[in-house]
Amino acid sequence: MKKKIITSILSVALIVSLGINVFAYTVTYGPTSSWNYSNYSHGSYVPKTGSMSTTFYDFDPSTGLDDANTYVSFTLDSSNVSSILDFNNGGDNPGTEADNKTCYLSIDVRSKRTGSDDMMSAYSVTSSLPNPKTDIENDDIFGNRNEESEVVALGTVQAQGYYMSTMWDDYRSGGSTDNGRWDCQFGVSGQYLKVGGVWIPSSGDYNAIMISDVNQASVSYGNNSGRP
Amino acid sequence: MNRKLLKIATTLLVISTLVFGAVSAYATVKDSYNPINKYEKIEKTNDGIEKYKQSVKEQYNQLKIANVSDVMVTITFDKALSMEELERYVIKHNIKPVQIQARSLQGDGTRVTTMSKTTKGYKQTDTIIQQELQKLNLTFVGYVSMYALVNSCDIDSIQNDRNTYLLDTSGDMFFAGKKEIDGKERNKIDNVKIAKRFPQALAWDLENLRSK
């Protein structure tokens, strides 16, 4: 995976006035991680090119927690689309694991903690994917925050560019283990639960039936909130 | 020796019974409702969506008779609402928002969806959403759906509101056999992953049908 660090840091005090709310904050653009594959060996549904960029918002303490943003941008080509539509139809899907299951393209962005607490908690997802169902959740049984942001595209995808932007509450406070990283991974998900090695239809939970063998992008963050 | 074996066998039997019971109970409740599967089965035509709407409305009476609180619902709005309209709607019907979905458009007309938790309060959530749209250079259309908790005594007024297309109650654990009056008790089995139980809103399909 190719990691590209964008070093440009803008420290601009902004006053954003929207309706009755006024927030003062400093914006810092963090690292970007990109991928560029020559083939589909990491999954027929995985776009060959894409990136995850990061932005950090250092708010005036009186307005509450700092924020962070992860922005995943990618382009589906006609081969990806053909594969994803095949998964959408169920039946004899690409590979064997997902056969006879209706699955949808899914993107996970997960915050990986270093210490005992998750320092990033997702609260908002914006996506251009068709008819998305989102899942902002706590998947870490030892964690206490929404460390995972997931989007499942229930609509019909096309060969074009898409994005998924997630806003995170930033709970870091300079502690020695407050650092961590975000991983972005593509998969195909369905509403199934694996019990004794067998996938059965489930309620509520939808899971990645197939997931890329590698993270498409990873970006690390340091120990202090509002900064990369 | 035999006594030792008997003890081991008894322990194993107890453990396996407990595990089997837990798994069975889990599977029974968990398998009772599958929002994506249910959504897939809706025929995406005017007739198909109307038929689904009627089938959901037929469930209301059971909830009203039981007089339960905090029913898990997905509300699809009949038209995109402004923040002010959403605020009035929420207050009028005593709704506890969980997540709101906003529609916006790219310059080329591509639809974009913002899905935001409302733990910061829906007014601040609106501000955050507007900031996000501004950053992404999107044109805000309005709020098209929401996940929420509502009391069963408010179901009729919500469904009869001209801004409501459908109040979908299908995801509540009441229909999985859980009959606690208190919604937080009733739905606690899924409290960690509660967002996944909310039915998929019909806004995307309504937009498709109405644009034809």
Image: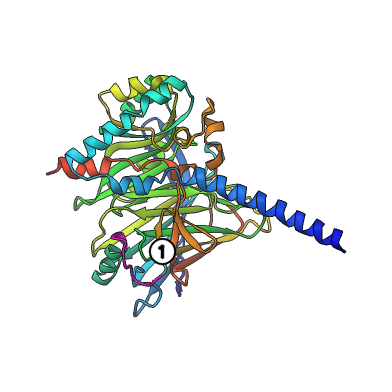
Magenta stretch: helix, strand or loop mostly: loop
Name the residue beneath numbered marker 1: A187
Q: B207 and B180: which one is in front?
A: B180
Q: Residue at x 61, y 47 (%)?
A: B21
Q: Which residues are magenta?
A: A87-96
Q: In the image, is A86 to the left or to the right of A4?
A: left
Residue sitting at 28 percent across and 22 percent down? B160
Residue at point 65% right, 53% down? A174
Letter of the chain that mark 1 sits on in the rendering: A
- The single residue placed furthest to the left in the displayed view is B212
Residue B103 visible? The answer is: yes
Confirm whether the magenta stretch covers residue A89.
Answer: yes
Please identify the quarter of the rendering in which residue B71 is found.
Answer: top left
Q: Residue furthest front?
A: B2
A93 relative to B20, above or below: below
Q: Residues within 10 Å of mark 1 (few under 14, many from 20)?
A: many
Q: Give the position of the C terminus of chain B as an image quadrant.
A: top left
Q: Residue at x 30, y 59 (%)?
A: A88
Is A172 left or right of A2, judged from the image as shown?
right
Residue B104 percent location from the top left of the image: 27, 44
